[in-house]
Amino acid sequence: MSQTLTNADAKPEVIQELRNLADCGATVRQLVAVIQTRTGLKEDAILPVLWYFMNAFSLTLPEVLPIREWLETREDKDIDSIILPAIEKARGR
Amino acid sequence: MLESKFVWITPEGKGIIGSLDENGLLTFAVEAGPASSIRGAELFDRMMKHFGHEVRAIQGVWRKSNQGRPSTNIDKVNELTRQGMLLEDAILKPWTVTQAKKWGFDQVHVIGLIEGIPGAYTKIDVLIEKQKP
């Protein structure tokens, strides 16, 4: 169980889209692009990206933090190898 | 104690996400700067007020990639160690530690493996605690 105080509720339809895409094998970059498009925020707005990953895939903040350092790089294989297994592992939460 | 989160995100996408685990270990990510409508220090204070005495320690996850975005904490450590300061002294100076000290957390320890060299660290994890009585 968890308790959350937030002023930024994630949109259910975006969460569902992220889950559907992940089920179809989307990469982290593709998932991030969906969040950026749906929220209309600038590409350097990292917190909404982290928050949507936490909500959509039941990941913890420490688990999604690597996205912060990766976002402006091109090291997609590295981030996929960290985040996609974490999403798979968290499915039962 | 339950896992607890504090999330405050501004319309421009700045803000703070704090996560307190069942052991009272606080991890957080903050984004403020010139484009933000709220200062990072105020975000940190709001988060600490929310969690209150449940916080036992603060974990700093400081990373720097070759191509990546600026990272206030590790950039400060690199700046100071490049000038010759010892790592054990340099980790007392970054933004997060300065903010934590205001709340009585003034003991800083490196945890886990460090990556990089003085002036060019890429991975430093720290634990910030209150002085034990």
Image (cartoon, helix red, strand yellow):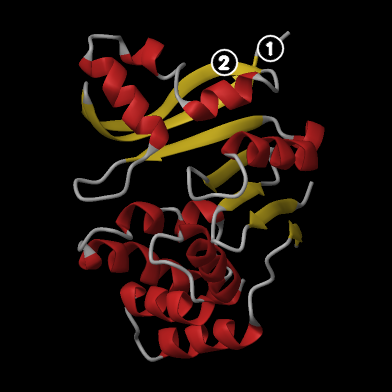
- Mark 2: which amino acid? Gln
Q: Are marks 1 and 2 on the same chain?
A: yes
Report if residue B127 is visible in the image: no
Disc nearest the viewer among 1 and 2:
2
Is B14 on the left or on the right of A27, as rendered? right
Instruction: Report, in whole angstroms, how far the alpha carbon at label 1 lies from the one at label 2.
Output: 9 Å
Rendering quarter of residue B30: top right
Report if residue A31 is visible in the image: yes
Q: Measured from the top left, where is residue B131 in percent x and y?
A: 66, 12
Label 2 neighbour load within 10 Å: few <14, some 14-19, many 20+:
some
Secondary structure of the residue carrying tag 1 is loop
Q: Measured from the top left, where is residue A5 in percent x and y?
A: 76, 57
Is A40 on the left or on the right of B22, as rendered? left
Mark drawn on residue A16: none
- The residue pinned by badge 2 equals B107
> A4 or B25: nearer the eye?
A4
Asked if residue A75 is positioned above or below residue A93 in the image, the reply reads above
* Mark earlier in primary sequence (1, 2): 2
Is B83 on the left or on the right of B103, as rendered? left
- The residue pinned by badge 1 equals B132
Q: Residue at x 35, y 73 (%)?
A: A28
Q: Assign the C terminus of chain A to one quadrant of the image.
A: bottom right
Indicate the chain on which mark 1 is placed: B
Rendering quarter of residue B118: top left
Asked if residue A68 is positioned above or below residue B96 in the image, the reply reads below
> B94 or B54: nearer the eye?
B94
CB contact under 8 Å: marks 1 and 2: yes
Q: Residue at x 70, y 52 (%)?
A: B6
Q: How many marks?
A: 2
Asked if residue B57 is positioned above or below residue A43 in the image, the reply reads above
Secondary structure of the residue carrying tag 2 is strand
- Mark 1: which amino acid? Lys
